[in-house]
Amino acid sequence: MDLGPGRRGVPPRFVLRGVSEKNRDGKRTARERLAVEREKQKSADKRRRALVVGAAVVCVLGLAAVIGVVAANAGKDEGDESAGPVVAPSGANGEDNLVIPVGKDDARSTLTIWEDFRCPACKSFETTYRPVIHELTKGGQLRAEYRLATIIDGNLGGTGSRNAANAAACAQDVGKFTEYHDVLYDNQPPETDDAFADNARLIELAGKVDGLDTPAFRKCVEDGTHNSWVAKSAEAFTKGGFSGTPTVLLNGTNIFQDQKMTPEKLKQQVQEAAQG
């Protein structure tokens, strides 16, 4: 007798039951895969929100691993035994002359900005907050203090952070820091691309700032005139115990402690302080 599907001694109902169970298992596996994908998507969304909300993103460095690297690498090329004398840019002030000031000295609010020209989070901050910072500094309500770090050089290798910082200091020597600072961020390469290590590229970008591309500026960039000053600034960042860049302090308080911080809120706080 032909028992059909049960001809090997397995009754048809058990074969059907086995097929049904396989179908259920397949559906359950599909649901589990879907649940995993949903969790991955939630995690990805959470990471994206953490990167963009209020531009409170930072280029995080593993301090334990990087402190020595930053101190060793910042301010000198591979093979250099000495970084040379510390030459602060014109107009720099603060402790050890490590601050590049923008705005009026008598402004009631001070915004301290620790940044790294290779850091994409710094560019995100710039894109979001730059218009308000320019408005407030030009209006005399805010004094911005720019302080330069080189953590990406320490994390990923290369000298782009340092070389760009040196070039920005060279621009400060002739009163073009703000304009050149903005050009560097507008033309920032991908984080892993050490394009700013090429002094020719930094000089090329100086051509976007009226009156900056001069023989004196070129020599300053090519000689690394302010490399040791940049190294000293990077050391101050490390000793300050900051977790990453950008670190932005309004009158000494990290603005990103307020998770609802926005450019408009920053502007309001500065204007209220200006009014007394």
Image (cartoon, helix red, strand yellow):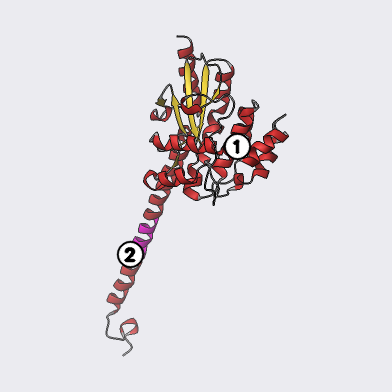
Query: Closest to the observer: 224 or 103?
Result: 224
Q: CA distance from mark 2 to mark 1?
A: 72 Å
Q: Position of residue 178 (x, y in %)?
A: 61, 28
Magenta-drawn stretch, dominant element (helix, strand or loop): helix
Q: Residue at x 68, y 38 (%)?
A: 219
Q: Which residue is mark 1?
A: 225
Q: Residue at x 55, y 48 (%)?
A: 77
Residue 145 appears in the rendering? yes
Q: Position of residue 3 (x, y in %)?
A: 31, 85
Quarter of the image for residue 33 reads bottom left
Span shown in magenta: 26-34
Lateral position of residue 134 relative to residue 8, left or right: right
SS at mark 1 in the image: loop
SS at mark 2 in the image: helix
First along the sequence among labels 2 and 1? 2
Query: Closest to the observer: 142 or 166?
Result: 166
Residue 23 vertical position relative to residue 201 in the rendered view, above or below:
below
Which residue type does callout 1 highlight?
Thr
